[in-house]
Image (cartoon, coloured by chain):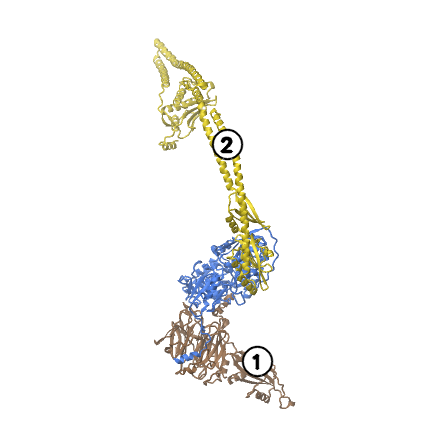
Amino acid sequence: MLAVIAASSALPCDDSLAASRARYGGNLRLAIAARPADANPSLADAPWDAALLSLTAKPICTLDDGRRIHPVLASEISWQGAIKLQIALRPGLRFHDDAALNAKEILASWSRLSQPSSKSPYRALLFAARPEALRVASAGASQQLLEVPLTFAWPDLAASLCHPALAIKAAAESRAGIGPFKPSSNAGELEANLGFPLGRPFVDRLSVAFTDERGAARRLALRQAQVVFGTAGQRPSADSPPALYATYLAFRAERVGADFRQAFDASIDRGDLTRFFVPAPSVAMNALLPPALMPQPAIQRPPVPAPGVRRALTLTFDQSLPEQRLVAERIQVKLHDLKYAIALRPVPRAQLRAAWASGDFDLMLHAVLLPPFAAPALAVAIELAGARELLSAELPAIGALVDAGERERAALERARALLPSLSLIPLYSQAIGIQASSEVISLGQDGYGLPALDDAILLPQ
Amino acid sequence: MRLRTRLALAFALLAVVPLALVVPRAIGEVRGILSKDLESRLQSVRTVAETAVQETGRDALRAVEEIAGSVALEDFARELRAQGPSNQRLAVAKRLMDGRNLSVLSLFDAEGKTLSSGHLPARVGDPDPALFAATQNATQGALPVLVDLRGEAGVHRYPALVAARSFEYGELRIWVVGGRVLDSNFADQLFQMTGARVEISDEDGQVAAAGEIAPPPVETALALGPAVRIALKLSRAPVIHTETVLVRAFIALIAFGLALAAVLGFLFARFITRPIDAVAEAATKIAAGAFDLKVPESSSGEVGELVRAFNRMTAELQSTTQQLIASERVAAWQEVARRLAHEIKNPLTPIKMSLETLLAASERREPSFDQLFKDSAAAVLEEVERLRRIVDEFSQFARLPKPQLALVNLSELSQQVLSLYAPPREGVEIGSQIAPRVWVSADRDQLTQLLLNLIKNAEEALEGNGRIDVRLKNAAGQAVLEVADSGKGIALEDQARIFEPYFTTKQGGSGLGLAIARRISQEHGGSLEVASSPGAGAVFTLILPAAAEPAASNHRADDREQAMP
Amino acid sequence: MSIRAVRAAAWLAVAMGPIALGRLALSADPRPPESTALVRVSKSVSAQLSDAEPPLAVYVVAGSAELARSFATLLISELAARNLAPLAISAPSAEAAEAGARSRGARSLVRLQVALSNGVLQARGDLISTWVNFWSGQAGARSGRPAAVIYASVEADAQVLALAAAAATSAPLKAGELQLETAKLADLPTWTGALAAGDLNGDGADEIVALTNDEILAFSSDGRLLARRDHRGLGDSPVPCREPFGAISIQSRRIAYFSAARRKGEVLSLDAAGGEFRSLGAVNEVPVGAQGQTQIWGSFVPGRSAFAPELWSAGGERWSVPGPFWMLSFFSVPNGPRALIAFADGTASWGTGLGDLRRRVTTNAAAAMALIDVDGDGEPELVTTSSRYRPEADELRVLPAPPQSSARSASTPDGGAPSQELWRGTIQGGWALQLVGARAGAGRPDQIVVAVWMPDGSAQLRVFRRVAP
């Protein structure tokens, strides 16, 4: 036995805590500096909401940080020609509540986006698909094939299906999806889902606590939390997650007057707006799509329009996002000087979405998670602007381009051309602010810049 | 106007006039005292408000000086110099403001750009010239300025009292401008101290107000700088209330005097005029025929004389009237007897002639005697029958029994009579408009007789074709039954006599039908009138006092009516 | 880099266009390039010599005579094709070669040194003129400078490595005397879950078998793809593992394997032609390893990349090791430690056999460790990679095997003892997660085969082999 002990010392000994393979186990404590999220995936308009949602409910596929598609609930996603996508579902999948996942749950999850009660800008992701023609090609005992026929070629559909808003849920408000974690019997705790098709997460459990920004920082400092979402991090740099949560000021052109955009551009500097009022990581958006997707042109500040009659407008925003309040106040104060009397109306997110869907607003701050591909992102932005009729005019020409790079270029070119005609003023885009203690390694991110807590490894202390 | 009233008014007038002369004068005096008191209260309110404004300014200055010397501001300046502006320091001014009773606080750089703002965080990065202007006169105490504040409804400009101090950190110069908004909180505070309504206004109008007072107000105002004005208003309502109470008391006094005088005057006048009233009442009754009335002769003097003369006059009037009635009655009976004799005489002639013819034939032994006998006997029997009828009717008229009153549904009865009478003669059409449930207190048989007589009379008035209309209605507590025909009408001179016994214009009529009808109507306390114009038919109108509908028969009556054709 | 990148390549096609690229991307075919490293480097050198004046004398030196001979042969045939009239010169030194060339009437001479260094095959040298002016006599008339400097390098392959290793002796070594060289054996489209070596065709050299989440692949010792088989037909595991993981055990030319992504394992053999796998049936137990002639079976810890501590043999023997483990390595010698096990908590133990594994003796084990006779002396060395998780640059270390006794003499302070380390080299580009020893032939040192996970989700098999110093 002595020989054995002696030999051990001959091994390299650089880091006694790490191991060459991922370590499993541990309870990862997560603090979120925000209020608990809505369970409805199409309302996950804040980064931490989508991040939290994606722990327990995934779409049929996900994007990695290289924008590559990984089927999750599907075993294979393949094109049958240019206008038909075939999705083979993994057999035997079960929701967290043990209900079986079938093709009809997938269709139901997708069609929820278009329902009148929860109409969502994310339905533009599925614009090319013909929902009425979606069908289950074969429903054998082991394999289910789902065929998605398209009205026109739209090669980005497969990537669009990976959007967190298309997370598959048994019902819109249900907590039951299929994700790397599942709800535990203890409140505020998630446990590893051993049956997750991509493999269980490395940690055993995830304790989730909702607090404010100060509380989150304190928890991190006191080691009560190992990962914190929603704290102010650093400004985005080249290797930081893409800031894809784009916030727009949507307006109703007939109510705000013809020179509103000019007045806005003349009085509000997006750089200042972002720098002063939006917590990092965030970046100003001068173009229709955020800097992660397209280069931003410099904005020529137009002359201040001649003040006309005093115009009374209401600015509706999401009451659960503190930065939207600050931004709304800034807009209120700055446009006040140009004779716009703007009343603020903070509403819950579901109500905001309903107001958007019915067009019942003058001005609205609206955040959406854009896909990391220019063409579907453009579709979402157009939908958000309420110009759905433009989609059928714009998308087929872009989708007809086979080369991904060409599609990207064409989409960006259209994004530049369309911006002045859309009832939408881009403001800023955000990524999720994350801080993690040194015990957490391998905390990756996906193509949406969302943290992949299932990749995280917790080192023993 | 009656004498009694005039006397009462005269008494009242005498009581009111002195009061009306004294009261207004007294009210005027009291009003003067109250206004003076209000004026002095207004003055003290103004003094309190001025002190409060100065105190607020001093507090602001103290707080701003404390901030300018604070470690927190030094930290802020250091971070600012190191990192430049960012959202990390958005809340600095807000934190500095808390606990210092400031509602306005901005940190400016040397050029007047807002570095952090506690009252309007959205201003960060922008200049705020209105507020920064306070740094120009920083040596003076607090200054009134106008600051922008935002609420959910929009941005508003409020007056504020602010003080400014600068802070130097190396080459960095930071201005601290803070103070208190003269908003509704401030107004409310002033209201709590003074009890006066406080209205703060700038050049655009009112920005804040506190306290509710009842109108109308009296006002005094403080001017802070050229733009800001604080109006303090006290209510005149208590003064007005006191005045009102006083006036009401006087009015009540006058009203009471007036009422007392009126009552006393009335009683006194009544004592004087009671005998005159008795005479007037008696005269009215005498005019209606009560000739045996005597007014008590209790009074003396002129009034007693008047009563005695009146009584004498009444007695004479009574004896004259009785003589007149007796002679009229005789004349009437003479007339009746004359007509009755005439009626009886008429059949006697054919009887006599028949019997004479028979006798002659018998004597001549006429072969056709048997036949002749038969014919003559028939003629005699016919005339005897006629005589018997005349006598029956007369005795019926003379001995019409007292009606046995009972509740009768006149509507139902009219329908029955009409249906009994149907069918009318060829060429005659009978129409009816009968209101339901018209009840009268009557003798059913007599009333049936009356209705039959009227309808028969109408039918007889029609020569050839024509129309009879029977209408029944309930009007003002009276049952009104009209029987109208479209006959040739009744001559004006006949209309007065048509109800007299044995007056008839028709061949073969007894002349008693309408007389009996009128007699029945009178026995029932009603009336029967005719209206006619020659050639346009006649309308007989029976008016009877209506009776209340018996409760028990209500429903049955309804059923019956519905069942009627 | 996400762990999921390993599955990425297959789906890249879906993301990028409507053209169905089918199953596992053909673009990532694991076959080696058509031409070998020696051919490519000789083509490159001959291209640089195309302006030389014929006849051209060729002088080549290398670490091993086999390598020099092979290269010279290839180069001469390339030069002949270019009508440069090459002729081979053999001489004890470069100076002697110049004289030899002159004496053979060559107009020019290329002198090349061929070497294998860190997985790269390099040929470097110069071209000089050997023309003798009639008037100048026998004295050297050329200038001091070479006419041209020749340099070519390509990535080494197994063939080159085999040639370079041919000179290595199997004599016991002192510290510092061991020299290893590396070459890429094959590329794989996705990360590997298990790796094994064993003689599948009876030629005495071990074939390499690699397991990915979708396929099992067999390579010859020089990196040729022999056979591949899609194992997805075995059904999805209800509790799949996040990382590729599995076990392969080769005994008597039969390959037993079990991927953690699958519901079942399978036993295969390579058919006689050596180009196809034949299935011999499915298995429900995990072939963790083979101790001598005994096949050891075990099971996975559900959902985790580790084996459960309970092990058994077909003969009914049962063992229980102290905890879940990553790998188990056996080496059959009569008098040394024969079994090595790396536990999932980062510790490792070794002993004379499974029954002797009772204590955890180190806290910094690597997932890729093995007992391999690197120097060919018949005694195993301990070969290990970095014990850190995803290091910047992974490394391969060869350490003397723990001696049977006299432990104290070998004990050194923590931090490692360079004098004890027989060899250390870096593994470029990725992280080594599996490591096996493969016999190169009778009486020759074993090769070390390492499976490297590349950050882009693909994998590489690299071979390390002793070469002459």
Pick whichever, C355 or B148, lies toward us: B148
Chain that bears disc 1: C
* Above or below A399: residue A306: above
Q: Give residue C148's position: percent from left, percent from top.
A: 60, 82
**Dividing the picture into quarters, in which one does residue C284 lie?**
bottom left
Q: Secondary structure at mark 2?
A: helix
Q: Callout 2: few (<14), some (14-19), or many (20+) C-alpha neighbours within 10 Å?
A: some
In the picture, the disc for residue C151 is 1
Q: Is the residue C31 above or below the residue C128 in the image?
A: above
In three-dimensional space, the C-alpha distance between marks 1 and 2, rounded to whole angstroms, equals: 139 Å
Instruction: Pick whichever, C187 or B547, lies toward us.
Output: B547
Q: Secondary structure at mark 1?
A: strand
**Category of crowding for the residue at label 1, using alpha-carbon neighbours closer than 10 angstroms: few (below 14), some (14–19), many (at least 20):** some
Q: Is residue C202 above or below residue B192?
A: below
Indicate the chain coloured brown by its letter. C
Tell whether C423 sits left or right of B176. left
Q: Colour of chain B?
A: yellow
Residue type beneath disc 1: Tyr
| Chain A colour as displayed | blue
* Circle 2: residue type: Leu
Q: Which mark is drawn over residue B19?
A: 2
Quarter placement of the C terminus of chain A:
bottom left
